[in-house]
Amino acid sequence: MDTDTVTLFFALLATLAQALVVVALVLAVGARVSPAIARAKAAVVAQVAPQALALAAAVALVATLGSLYLSEVAGFPPCRLCWFQRIAMYPLVVVLGVAALRRDGGARLTGGILAGIGVAISVWHLLIERYPTLESGSCDPQNPCSIKWVEEFGYLTIPAMALSGFALILVLLAIARPTTSQESR
């Protein structure tokens, strides 16, 4: 498979993540004003909550594999902000994977902090991509953070894809509920 095909695949996954985040936000806000939407939200949460930690771990794993593909196979050198996003994403694979195996909702806080940091870095990276004048001397002049190695659908760049993954992880962590054995602790 060539790099264009793989980046399109990751862009489609990021678009799916964005759509799921929007649906979750609509359900969360709509549930406050509409009993019908509140029932729909409760039904979705009841279906997703038991698998939310595993799904969040899967999102982190796919994002990690995607970033490794882009740097190691496609040859796109990660900039400083990409490295910081990786520092936030890579541990999520282990933290959320172990939490899913143990059915331990206690990892929600750690995962949420890492994903929240990743969101902040991704947003800043997106701003630098859009407005390169914001780039300070902290970025490498040989590999600036403003380079767009990938741009799909006119807006999806690597940090936008990372932001999509971090946002979906946050939504899944908000939905995740500990099992009965953790609730009694």
Image (cartoon, grey):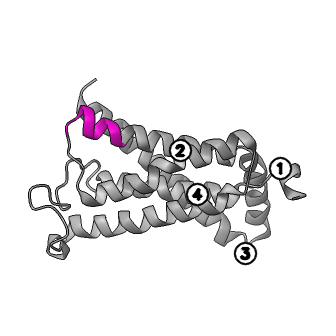
Q: Count residues near mark 2 (Cα–Cα under 10 Å), then give few for <14, some for 14-19, many for 20+.
A: many
Q: Residue furthest top?
A: 1
Which mark is first along the chain, 3 or 2? 3
- Foreground tag (4 vs 3): 4
Q: Which residue is mark 4?
A: 111
Q: Choose between 39 and 75: the one closer to the eye.
A: 75
Magenta stretch bounds: 67-75
Query: What predominant SS class does the magenta segment belong to?
Result: helix
Please tell me which residue is depicted at 75% across the width and 57% down the height of the picture.
40
Spatial CA distance of label 4 from label 3 is 26 Å
User: Which picture quadrant has residue 121?
Assistant: bottom left
Residue 1 visible in this rendered orientation of the protein: yes
Q: Quadrant of the N terminus?
A: top left
Q: Choose between 67 and 131: the one closer to the eye.
A: 67
Q: Which kind of residue does numbered mark 4 sit on?
A: Gly
Does dot 1 land on a helix, a strand or a loop? loop
- Foreground tag (1 vs 3): 1
Which mark is first along the chain, 3 or 4? 3
Spatial CA distance of label 1 from label 3 is 26 Å
Q: Which residue is mark 1?
A: 179
Spatial CA distance of label 4 from label 1 is 17 Å
Q: Quadrant of the C terminus?
A: bottom right
Q: Which kind of residue does numbered mark 2 sit on?
A: Val
Q: Is residue 55 left or right of residue 105?
A: left
